[in-house]
Image (tube, rainbow, N blue to C red):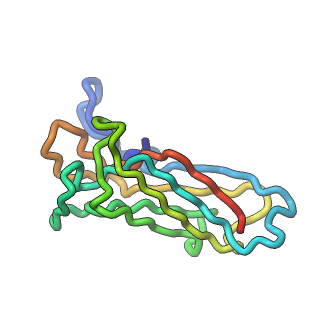
Amino acid sequence: MHWSVFGKTPKRPIDATDKIINHWHINFHLASGQLLGAEAGILTLQLAAVKGAAGNTDVKSPTEPYANVPLTLALNGMEEGTTTVLIPWWKSSSCIVRSAVSCYQVREKVRFDKEVLKEGWNHLELSLPDNATDTETAVLPNAIYVQYDALRFELA
């Protein structure tokens, strides 16, 4: 589970919002020669669930800033390697805390130009907005989150 913010607990009466929570880091190695003949890197994101401001209601609220959930992907810290995937409000569910078997699955493919990749270690950062929450009407966390099912990186 990739949360934008951790909610309160009995031992911590305030939300935890440090930058470690909403930024995830993946390091991967490309051996010498793997980039030969490649034009791009393709990242397939398979998400088991996404919780946006619509929760389980399937109703878009124009007053909620996170009706559509932005997931930002930055490759090797380069601005030109940054992409934001907007996960639409009608794909929202509350699967981490209920209905874990009846979620909307989301699949996105993101293309990164070969120029952003490098031989050796590469760094991919996946980021949700800091402290992104919604107005939750049920007894559920109000945090925005994504639940990863699988990530696949291929050279094309």
Question: Which image quadrant for residue 115?
Answer: bottom right
Specify the farthest residue to the left: 137
38 on left or right of 130 = right
Q: Quadrant of the N terminus?
A: top left
| Residue 125 picture location, percent across and down | 55, 56
| Residue 105 picture location, percent across and down | 41, 51
**Residue nearest the viewer, comparing 126 with 13:** 126
Identify the residue shown where x is 69% and y is 51%. Answer: 28
Identify the residue shown where x is 23% and y is 50%. Answer: 55
Specify the farthest residue to the top: 11
Q: Is residue 18 visible?
A: no
Identify the residue shown where x is 63% and y is 63%. Answer: 76
| Residue 118 picture location, percent across and down | 75, 65
Q: Quadrant of the C terminus?
A: bottom right
Residue 92, compared with residue 87, is above or below; it is above
**How many numbered discs?**
0
81 on left or right of 106 = right
**Residue nearest the viewer, comparing 58 with 121:** 58
Q: Is residue 30 visible?
A: yes
Residue 15, compared with residue 131, is above or below; it is above
| Residue 34 picture location, percent across and down | 82, 62
Question: Which image quadrant for residue 142?
Answer: top left
139 on left or right of 110 = left
Specify the farthest residue to the front: 102
Identify the residue shown where x is 58% and y is 75%. Answer: 80
**Residue nearest the viewer, comparing 59 with 124:** 59
Residue 80, compared with residue 96, is above or below; it is below
42 on left or right of 121 = left
